[in-house]
Amino acid sequence: MSPHASVGAIVYATNVVYAGFWLRFVAYLIDKLILGIATLALFIPMFLMFGGLAALESVSRSNFERFRPGQAAGFLTLILSFVFAAVIAHWLYFAYLESGEKQGTWGKQLMSVYVTDLSGNRIRFAQASGRFFAKIITGLIPLGIGYIMAGFTERKQALHDMIAGCLVLRR
């Protein structure tokens, strides 16, 4: 159990400080910056090694009259492979760190917030994975309302926190 949670269900605790929307938002921006740099550092060399420039050249305007569907399909496959790898990398980053010993991504750690279950315990990898993929549902709600909920719900939970049964707390 986390040293910041009281005994029993955290739902009834009075000494818990929930992380609000803005702390979580800044942590998210930090995480996206870290993941963006890591993704670029990994994917630019891979793009070059797997013939990305040649594929771009084949579909350029000057060669459009010699357009070959196979080349376009190869380029599309390359792009979709990168997207798939990026989703896997994001999932592992969030799920591994949030279910780990420090209970938060590097952005959350910098902002002194951490993720727990509703009882204040460290979440399992499966629960952290569920929380990550529940963000897809949260993101489908117009105007970011699923995320903004963290600013006005009683326990400062976004929709994906409610789905996964998680809380984000301040240290």
Image (cartoon, rainbow, N blue to C red):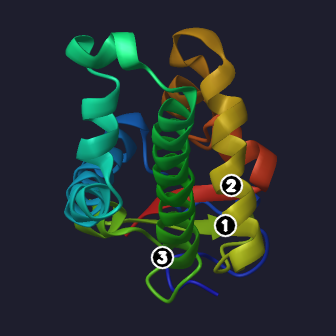
Q: Nearest the camera: 107 or 74?
A: 74
- The residue beneath circle 3 is 97
Q: Secondary structure at mark 1?
A: helix
Q: Who's the residue at 68% across and 55% down the image?
A: 131
Asked whether, in this view, residue 28 is left or right of residue 76, the answer is left
Q: Who's the residue at 20% across and 13% down the image?
A: 62
Residue 131: image tag: 2
| Residue 26 visible in the displayed image | no
Residue 128: image tag: 1
The answer to whether residue 72 is above or below residue 144 is: below
Mark 3 or 2 closer to N-term? 3
Q: Quadrant of the C terminus?
A: bottom left
Residue 105 horizontal/vertical position (percent): 40, 68
**Number of other residues with Cα within 10 Å of mark 2, as a class: few under 14, some 14 to 19, many 20 or more:** many
The answer to whether residue 122 is above or below residue 145 is: below
Mark 1 or 3 closer to N-term? 3
Q: Nearest the camera: 120 or 71?
A: 71
Q: Amino acid at mark 3?
A: Leu
Residue 19 horizontal/vertical position (percent): 44, 50
Q: How many marks?
A: 3
Q: Are marks 1 and 2 in contact (CB under 8 Å)?
A: yes
Asked whether, in this view, residue 19 is left or right of residue 146, the answer is left
Residue 143: image tag: none
Q: Who's the residue at 49% across and 89% down the image?
A: 101
| Residue 43 visible in the displayed image | yes
Residue 39 horizontal/vertical position (percent): 30, 58
Q: Quadrant of residue 149?
A: top right
